[in-house]
C-alpha cells in the first residue's frame, strides 16, 4: 500500500488511517510535534505556528478524505 506523500518527504511517523474526529486530531498533533522539532511540515516551512497549524489541519483532513 502506498504511504502518504507527506510522510515520505518529512520522514515523520505515518499518519493514522481513519475518518473519526479522534484520529484526525491525533494526526494534527503528530504533524505539529514534527513542526516544533524540525520547523517543517512535509517539504514546506510555515512562517509561524498558526500557519503550521492550518497546514497540519489540511493535511490531516486530506489523509482522512474529508472536508472541513
Image (cartoon, rainbow, N blue to C red):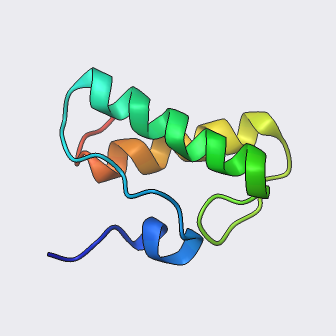
Residue 58 rendering spot, x and y as whole percentages: 47, 45
Which of 11/45 is in front?
A: 11
- On screen, residue 40 versus residue 66, left or right, reads right
- The number of numbered badges drawn on the structure is 0
Farthest-out residue, top = 22
Q: Residue at x 29, y 31 (%)?
A: 23
In the drawing, does residue 28 fall left or right of residue 63? right
Residue 15 drawn at (x, y percent): 36, 51
Quadrant in the picture for the N terminus:
bottom left
The image quadrant where one finds the C terminus is: top left
Image quadrant where residue 40 sits: bottom right
Q: Quadrant of residue 43?
A: bottom right
Residue 25, given in percent of the width and then of the height, sits at 41, 27
Residue nearest the observer in this picture, 50 or 10: 10
Q: Is residue 18 above or below residue 43?
A: above
Residue depicted at 34% across the width and 51% down the height: 62
Residue 9 x %, y %: 53, 76
6 horizontally vs 63: left or right: right
Residue appearing at x 34%, y 33% in the figure: 24
**Residue lying furthest right in this view?**
47
In the displayed structure image, the side of residue 9 where residue 43 appears, left or right: right
Which residue is painted at 55% across and 46% down in the image? 31
Amino acid at each position: 500500500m502506498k504511504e502518504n506523500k507527506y510522510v515520505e518527504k518529512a520522514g515523520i511517523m505515518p499518519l493514522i488511517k481513519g475518518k473519526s474526529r479522534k484520529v484526525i486530531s491525533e494526526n494534527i498533533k503528530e504533524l505539529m510535534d514534527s513542526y516544533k522539532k524540525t520547523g517543517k511540515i512535509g517539504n514546506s516551512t510555515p512562517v509561524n505556528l498558526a500557519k503550521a497549524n492550518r497546514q497540519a489541519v489540511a493535511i490531516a483532513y486530506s489523509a482522512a478524505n474529508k472536508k472541513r
